[in-house]
């Protein structure tokens, strides 16, 4: 599998954006756009129309749960994965109710996070074998 699509990576922490970018590049040659908050994310999403959006839950200015429905209003079929280091049942349920494709713990060990990203990409973008 080689993922070469556009990715919007939204997180207020530069080291997390760098870490996730490195992992994404092990899966192919994606074009990665970065935003530090939800407001920036909406602008970039509208302009770049990414194939995959990785959206942090907790951010200043506008958090991920506020941003998620705004992104889906632009593209109802968008693949949006919530990133969080605080996994509570309430956050997961709220993200699912708002239309998130999935969620990932960004504090997972490197191999587990890479495998989870690979699975999400394969499920969301790989053509079916019978096509």
Image: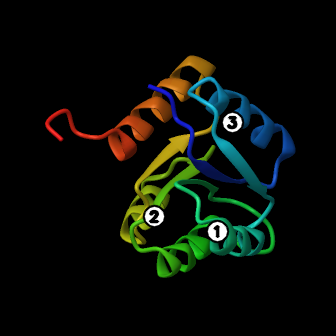
Where does label 3 land, which residue?
Answer: 20
Dividing the image into 4 quarters, which one contains the C terminus?
top left
Of labels 1 and 3, the one closer to you = 1
Q: Secondary structure at mark 3?
A: helix
Q: CA distance from mark 1 to mark 3?
A: 18 Å
Task: Looking at the picture, tell me which residue is in the foreground, 116 or 124.
Answer: 124
Depth check, front residue: 66 or 79: 79
Mark 2–mark 3 distance (CA, rounded to whole Å): 19 Å
Badge 1 marks a residue whose secondary structure is helix
Q: Which residue is mark 1?
A: 45
Seen from the viewer's position, the closer of residues 130 and 123 is 130
Picture quarter containing residue 64?
bottom right
In the image, 32: left or right of 52?
right
Percent coordinates x, y for residue 118 in the rendering: 46, 30
Mark 2 crowdedness (10 Å alpha carbons): few <14, some 14-19, many ≥20: many
* Disc 3 packing (10 Å; few <14; some 14–19; many ≥20): some
First in sequence: mark 2 vs mark 3: 3
Residue at 49% across, 51% down:
88
- Residue lying farthest to the right in this orientation: 14
Q: Position of residue 71 (x, y in %)?
A: 55, 73
Check the image and report above or below for 51 versus 97. above
């Amino acid at each position: 599998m080689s993922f070469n699509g556009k990715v919007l990576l939204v997180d207020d922490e530069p080291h997390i954006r760098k870490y996730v970018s490195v992992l994404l590049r092990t899966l192919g040659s994606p074009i990665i756009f970065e935003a530090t908050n939800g407001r920036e994310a909406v602008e970039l999403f509208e302009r770049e129309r990414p194939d995959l959006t990785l959206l942090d839950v907790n951010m200043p200015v506008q958090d991920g749960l506020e941003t998620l429905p705004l992104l889906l209003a632009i593209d109802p079929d968008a693949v949006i994965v919530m990133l969080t280091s605080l996994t509570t049942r309430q956050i997961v349920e709220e993200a699912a109710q708002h239309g998130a494709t999935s969620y990932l713990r960004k504090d997972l060990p490197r191999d587990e996070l890479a495998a989870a990203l690979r699975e999400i990409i394969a499920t969301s973008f790989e053509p079916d074998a019978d096509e």
